[in-house]
Amino acid sequence: MKVVTVGTGMAAAEFVERLRLDGFAGEIVMCGDEEFAPYSPCVIPFYLAGEPLETVYWKGSDFYGRYRVTPRLADPVVEVDADRRLVRTVTGRSERYDRLFYAAGARSWYPRPDWLDTRGVFGFKTLSDMVAIDRYIREHNVSEAVVFGGGFIGVDAALALWHRGLKITLVHRNTRVLSQMTDEEGGQFATGKLAEKTGMDIRLRTTVADIVATGGELSAVRFSDGTTRETKLLIVAIGVSPNSEPLRGDDKGVPSDRQMLAEAGIYAAGDVAVTPHAVTGEAGVYATYPNAMRQARTAARHLLHGDGSYAGSVNTNVLKKHIDFPIVSAGSFTGEPVTWQRGDVWRRVYLKDGMINGYIIIGDTKMSGYIYQLYVSRRRVDGTIRTILSSPRHDAYYRQVTGCGAGRASGRGYGVQGVMAG
């Protein structure tokens, strides 16, 4: 049997590793857009912040050789012919498969794609982006930057560049940063702490209206409020779209069943997969590291053994890099809010029918593993949640009060909303 993966990211690497560790001896070909070994998008900002490149290769830079993989790199797949069981790449190469693992990830969305023709304007999604940004900063002696987008990717970019020593202007159209992983009050708290701890110039209800180029290089950015900021570097981080066109013909993602099958002989996982939510059942793209890992393992088990079932995804969001006030959230921010705050610590749980419907924890997230377990297990907590939120972490205490063992919210801080799983 010949297995081909579309994508060389975390989901594809986990899938291949599981196959080999479970005894699969057939041919494996991995097709990727970039020239690198499988890397973790969750940690590529660390490279931009100054860590060695080897840091991003979460399964080792020798992955292809160690797992007997034929890599087809820097040659994006542009078409999947399911009837003939072929994939075709942008250079015209065709690759036959018996089973296909489609984990093509997601790509940055740009309001003005022509901006990318100007040197100094970059996305913030791939290792290629990080390498190009790093080179540009060094070659042009960049000391400050504008980051367009205050969602997870934008804040991640701003923190990485700030950690590197750049002065940051963060521009966001919403009333608060991290608006998809917080409610209004939690987002305002996070926005204030971000500005306080980093000194960033955070401009809310504002967008980048246009850019100014001199000799083909960025020289300034014009904001929607009419002001202008001179800068050599603009990071555009306002959203991503699933790379589902080669298989589906659109960018809406690839629906997968409980075995991660999109159709006969084709599995889909990671940032491109549409799966049911483990709690609500609502179908969507829940692009996080833990979801991608579980999806890859489910697909590998089904391919090898014909069994295995995916329990569903959870939209857990974790921000922990480069800053001393981590943020963890999950679920829906509707229902009865229960809030506790002290100093830099802010915690809120939303209750519905006595169970956790969603939660936001800012500043001290050590308890988040327990809250996560209470959320997904659907336990009634209306009698204990106020005590839990107001107490310092103590494993024995939490196990007694919650009935849960010690747990992690989402894999050592690698759960990321909207990106980083494919």
Image (cartoon, rainbow, N blue to C red):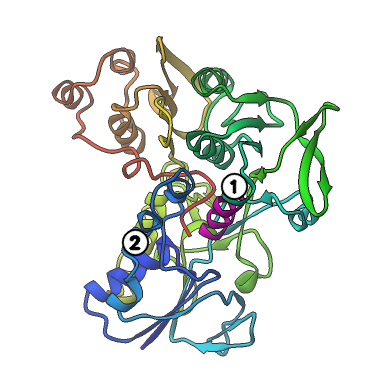
**In which quadrant of the rendered view does residue 322 lie?**
top left
Marking on residue 137 = 1
Q: Nearer the viewer, mark 1 or mark 2?
A: 1
Compared across the picture, whether 192 is left or right of 331 comes to right
Q: Is residue 281 left or right of residue 187?
A: left
For the residue labelled by badge 2, is the local secondary structure a helix, a strand or a loop? loop
Residue sitting at the far top: 342
Q: Residue at x 80, y 54 (%)?
A: 216
Residue that protrudes farthest toward the left in the picture: 396
Looking at the image, which is closer to me, 349 or 238?
Answer: 238
**For the residue labelled by badge 1, is the local secondary structure a helix, a strand or a loop?**
helix
Residue beneath the point at 43% across and 86% down: 98
Residue type, label 2: Ser
Which of the two discs, 1 and 2, labels the residue nearer the N terminus? 1
What residue do we see at 31% from left, 62% from top?
59
Q: Residues within 10 Å of mark 2 (few under 14, many from 20)?
A: some
Could you tell me the amino acid type at mark 1? Answer: Ile
Disc 1 and disc 2: Cα gap in Å? Answer: 46 Å
- Compare residues 349 and 170 and report the one nearer the observer: 170
Q: Is residue 214 above or below residue 168?
A: below
- Picture coordinates of residue 354, whole percent (x, y): 38, 23
The magenta-colored residue range is 127-137
Q: Is residue 239 left or right of residue 185?
A: right
Q: Is residue 328 magenta?
A: no
Mark 1 burial class by Cα count in 10 Å: few <14, some 14-19, many 20+: some
The reply to whether residue 273 is visible in this rendering is no
Vertical arrangement, residue 305 with respect to residue 359, above or below: below
Tell how many labels: 2
**Residue at 83% of width from left, 53% of height from top?**
215
The image quadrant that residue 389 belongs to is top left
Residue 242 appears in the rendering: yes
Query: Which residue is disc 2 drawn over?
Result: 309
